[in-house]
Image (cartoon, rainbow, N blue to C red):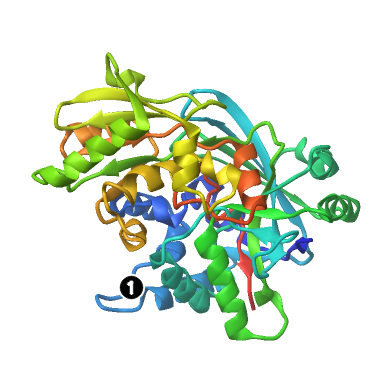
Amino acid sequence: MADVQPLRALHYDQSVTGPLGNVLSPPYDVIDPEQRGRLAALSPYNVVNIDLPEPDEPGGDPYAAAARILGQWRDSGAVVRDPQPAIWALTQEYAGPDGVTRIRRGFLARVRVEDYGPGRIRPHERTHPGPKEDRLRLTRATQANLSPIFSLYSDPAGAAWAAIASHVTDAPDGEQTDADGTRNRLWRIADPAALDAVASALAPAELLIADGHHRYETARVYADEIGGEGDHRYVLMQLVALDDPGLTVFPTHRLINGLAGDEDRRGRLDAALHEAFEITELASTAELPPRQTDGLLELGYLDGSTGKAYRLTLRDQAIADRALADFPAPYRRLDTAIVEALILTGPLGLSEDDISHFRGLGYSRSDAEAVELVTAGSYDVAFFLPGATVAQIGEIAAAGVNMPPKSTFFTPKVPTGLIFNPLA
């Protein structure tokens, strides 16, 4: 079983910093320079100053700047440490890309860092190499987890949330509505009976990392660097039940460039698509998003050279089964795995290294953005994916294999700055 514990968190003292709306930020990896500037301007205490730090002077060390700023916040009382362990309930009311409003419920806790394995903690995607070194240097400097990893656990009876539900009927300890309209509400729960009940509910749980693989792998490296036992052996996580009605997952579409002027490569792609898929021209780009179906895989396909939109339907599951013969059955039905095998690494000739470093490949989580990028000529073609289901993600993880990068898009993101996990 995974070792899930309450923690003596570091958190903002809102009597010093003002409300959470001014100090929280999205995760570091979705913030562009312009947005970083807007967030930093909201408050001198905005977490972007330490989670996406800038050096004190040109050519300086941004990680040392993050450590200095966090130290100043602690010294001034802007950030304080809890006197006793607690978990922090978080509800997120949001509208998904499908336009439906939902409420996702979970809680923040610390989890012992372990090697991946059955019955404990599993990944669900392969990761890119770049972000790990950045997050490791930041962890070394600040000696804290600044943002939570998002993980899932199975709890069909809803016992863990039931144990804390009565504590989220009062006014929250903090509240924020972000730029996307997501309403985040946070409650600190230190009641020993509630904490014991949550621990009991999670005792048999296996955790599946949904978002934050780089940060988890960074935490493993950091824990081993320090060695021995202590707070550094734990990492901050936001835990949500796989059975939570507010949990959704959406697709990340694939965009390809490098086809313009390369007739051989374009020809290989066209031949592969005709061989593996039934192709139907669509009346407009509005029809590109495919359905999730238990039958044969459907994709949307936009060809920038003609501006035409198509529906691609896999001719036979046996085609994917042959291409992915070394993988378990649930993986062979995964949209991103089929696209990778039949299109990206096949006729397009992308290597694992190309995919890891975004050479010739881009991603979009928005139907409209993908259409715009192809129409504007930034990419030559786009493949619109239906996305994996929550059940499919669990089945593939249980089979012991990882999905291709960016196979899933869990929304909303968990804000950075709700609480911090001190490691020393």
Residue 369 spot, x, y in % from top left: 30, 34
Who is closer to the viewer here, 144 or 201?
Answer: 201
Q: Name the residue at the right extreme.
A: 193
Q: Which residue is drawn at 51% across and 30% down?
A: 96
- Depth check: give the residue in front, 403 or 234: 403
- Point 53% across, 64% down: residue: 215
Q: In this view, does 251 lie to the left or right of 77?
A: left
Look at the numbered disc 1 and give the secondary structure of its residue. Answer: loop
Residue 23, percent across and down?
50, 53
Residue underneath mark 1: 55
316 with respect to 91 (left or right): left
Residue 251: give x, y in percent of width and height: 46, 37
Is residue 55 positioned above or below 92 on the image?
below
- Whether residue 238 is visible here, answered yes or no, is no
The answer to whether residue 75 is seen in the rendering is yes
Task: In this rendered view, identify the residue nearer to me: 69 or 192.
Answer: 192
Quadrant position of residue 241:
top right
Q: In this view, does 62 lie above or below 171?
A: below
Q: Position of residue 335 (x, y in %)?
A: 46, 38
Up the image or down, 218 lies above or below 324; here it is below
Q: Which quarter shows the N terminus?
A: bottom right
The residue closer to the viewer here, 351 or 289, is 351
How many marks on residues? Answer: 1
Q: How crowded is mark 1: few (under 14 residues within 10 Å), some or many (20 or more)?
A: few
- Tag 1: amino acid: Pro
